[in-house]
Amino acid sequence: MNQPKYLSFFVLVFFVLGLAGFAPAADLVVDTDFGAENQIVVSFRAAVDKAEMADAARYSVFEESDPDIRLTVTSVALSDDGRQATLSFAEPLNTTKTHIVMTKDIGGIEQTSSPVSKSYFGYLLSILISALLINNFVFTKYLGLCVFFGTSKRKQTAKGMGVVFTIVIVVAVSMSWVLFQYVLKPFKLDYLQIVVFIGLTSLTVQAVDTVLRKVNPILFKSFGVYLVLVIANCVIIAVPLLMASNEYNFFETFMLSLGAGGGFLLALYLMSSVSERVELAKVPPSFKGLPIAFIVAGQFAMAFLGFSGLELF
Amino acid sequence: MANKKSNFQLVANGILQENPIFKLALSMCPAVGISTTVMNGVMLGIAVLFVQVFSSVTISLLKDFIHPRIRIPTYTLTIATWVTVIDLSLAAYFPAAYAQMGIFVKIIVAFAIITMRLEMFASKEPITASFWDGIGMGLGFLVGMVAIGFIRELLGSGAILGHDVLGFKPLLFFILPSAGFFVVGLMMGFFNWIETYYARRKRGEA
């Protein structure tokens, strides 16, 4: 009985979506997208005059947030069917920002303007993947090593430490973000960053400790020992500092901290899997313990270098 | 108190017997991360020395006023204060070197070695002893960083402190970031080997 209602609702939604999707570019430019790091690809509805299309002066591109700064188009390359123009710029574009491409006097149409942006969700995921693999805090930024070598001997310990660390870092960094955005920045107290962030982290650790002890004593028994170690981990202070210097918003901060924690868990788990085997191997006596652990970590670091070109979104 | 070491022994202890990098294996992050040149090692070493000495003295002064239950947060905040001081000073007076060290100066706040020395030493001992212990630990860290930086810079770019000494680059691998792990691991293994070698010789002689 309700079906017709729903149907018309859907039709309406699709209509509105369609309008929203096509209206700005309906006339000439169908689609714009980021190409290589310093390129934007503009697709036209139909083949247009090639001389007009290839004229760099007929395009103007700027970041949506500052329209005054025009990015100079150095060259325009056309596709064979004459429906795509690839604009090249002198410097790599900041693909995290929305860019506006305006065309002038192309195909007889005076002016068009169309936005270029990456999907925000993809951007958030790319922050997560970056913190997890490409810029893994342990293997490519060399942070948190003391705790890393201390707790990567057994898989059980590695899992416990990794999970506790992830929880604490997500909570602590989210709170740091609030404090940074609403207290430190408005009152120009940026120079107190270190003190505030580390203080907040100790407070979080203390709070988790107290709450867990009362709420779930069994969980506390197995995870409580790692809480103290969290504060000695450089990653816990590096992440809020990164967040502050990159001016991340809340979702980006959340993804960064999740990636940092997850990356630490991943590194610990990988390392502990190897450590358990190294114990059974015949290692020269002077290399037993830490030295061999360092060399294994070095090999992991080299392997993680392979992620450096990874780009998913 | 219980500790009757002379000031010189305290300093030597920090550099040799309890070297923060090679013996205690604490504060490894900078030892791996930015030990590519001797200069980096010296700069960060000085920063750590400064923070260690001043935090030790501060805690030693205040040890009677700190409630034992909140001692760890107190240590952390003391260290954070001194780290802020050195961070802002380096940024103001040595902008080039500061840019190279990146986030590592701020990270000093989470170095286990400093907190550990406050907990183990400064919170129990008088001010002068804490001062010399801080000097010893800071110098030990500095020496360790310089040693690693020396090897990596010499083998990686054939230079010392930016001056070309070898005229060629033996192993470019050593200035690549991931080589830090290998260098530290190999050096630790080497020191262990020397130690066991001497121990064995001593036993042979005895």
Image (cartoon, coloured by chain):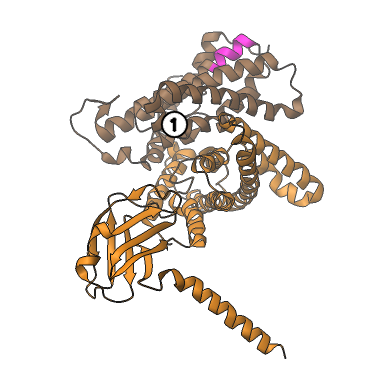
Chain colours: A orange, B brown
Tell me if residue B4 can be seen: no
Part of the protein shown in magenta: B127-134
Q: Quadrant of the N terminus of chain A?
A: bottom right
What's the magenta bit mostly, secondary-structure-wise? helix
Q: Which residue does the image show at 41% across and 40% down from the upper left?
A: B181
Asked whether, in this view, residue A79 is left or right of residue A254, the answer is left
Q: Nearer the viewer, residue A18 or B150?
A: A18
**Magenta stretch holds residue B200:** no
Q: Is residue B156 above or below residue A92?
A: above
Asked whether, in this view, residue A52 is left or right of residue B12, the answer is left
Q: Quadrant of the C terminus of chain A?
A: bottom left
Q: Amino acid at mark 1?
A: Asn
Q: Where residue A232 appears, x then y in whole percent?
A: 59, 36
Few, some or many residues within 10 Å of mark 1 (<14, 14–19, 20+): some
Displayed quadrant of residue B164: top left
Q: Secondary structure at mark 1?
A: helix
Tell me if residue A2 can be seen: yes
Q: Nearer the viewer, residue B112 or A171?
A: A171
Q: Nearer the viewer, residue A233 or B12?
A: A233
Q: Where residue A35 appears, x then y in whole percent?
A: 33, 62
Q: Is residue A195 above or below residue A312?
A: above
Asked whether, in this view, residue B114 is left or right of residue A137, the answer is right
**Magenta stretch holds residue B131:** yes
Which residue position holds label 1? B192
Q: Where residue A261 appears, x then y in whole percent?
A: 57, 49
Q: Is residue A66 above or below residue B148?
A: below
Chain to which the residue tagged by mark 1 belongs = B
Q: Residue furthest left?
A: B167
Displayed quadrant of residue A2: bottom right
Asked whether, in this view, residue A158 is left or right of residue B71, the answer is left
Q: Which residue does the image show at 42% across and 50% down from the upper left?
A: A300
